[in-house]
Amino acid sequence: MSFFDDPFWIGVFERVSEGKLSASKIIFGAMPKDYEVYEWILCNYYEMKFSLSVENNKKDIKMNPKRMQRSVKRQLVTSGIGTKSQQTLKLQQEQTKMQRRQISRKQKEMEKKYKFEMKQQKRKEKHKGK
């Protein structure tokens, strides 16, 4: 599936395995032609980073259209807007964001520790005399 998200065309690839859904998002730029997408898939499919798997519950139940509308409204209020694949992509984005925050926090601590050690070393050199 591809859609236009100004200014780029974005492709969302869904993979269903053992009843679990995972998704990957690719930014194409200009509107890709079908053969370009097919060629891209052939070349880069195994390098794609798919999100964590989420249960894929699909039920084929006949329902009154008005009742279906009401239930959809209730579900949108509780779960938010977006397809399952968009929600899994959002989950993946939040996880990478948390990882980046942890890494930057560690770097800041290391830098702070380094600066402190440098100050201590300068102090010791001043007291020693030259």
Image: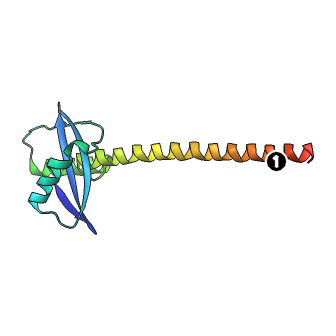
- As rendered, which of 122 and 129 lies closer to the eye? 129
Residue 89, horizontal then vertical, whole percent: 30, 47
Q: What residue type is labelled 1?
A: Lys
- As rendered, which of 97 and 85 lies closer to the eye? 97
Q: In which quarter of the image is residue 117?
A: top right
Asked if residue 39 lies left or right of residue 76, the reply is left
Q: Residue furthest top?
A: 18
> Residue placed at 33% from the left, 48% from the top?
90
Q: In which quarter of the image is residue 35?
A: bottom left
Q: How many labels does the image show?
A: 1
- As rendered, which of 4 and 84 lies closer to the eye? 4
Q: Which residue lies furthest to the left in this view?
A: 62
- As rendered, which of 104 and 88 lies closer to the eye? 104
Q: What element carries label 1?
A: helix
Residue 42, horizontal then vertical, whole percent: 14, 48
Asked if residue 117 lies left or right of residue 42, the reply is right
To which residue does mark 1 refer?
A: 122
Q: Quadrant of the N terminus?
A: bottom left
Q: Which residue lies furthest to the bottom in this view?
A: 7
Residue 96, horizontal then vertical, whole percent: 41, 45
> Residue placed at 9% from the left, 44% from the top?
63
Asked if residue 45 lies left or right of residue 125, the reply is left
> Residue placed at 11% from the left, 53% from the top?
38
> Residue placed at 69% from the left, 42% from the top?
113
Circle 1 Cα neighbour tier, 10 Å, few/some/many (<14 / 14–19 / ≥20)? few
Residue 40, horizontal then vertical, whole percent: 17, 53
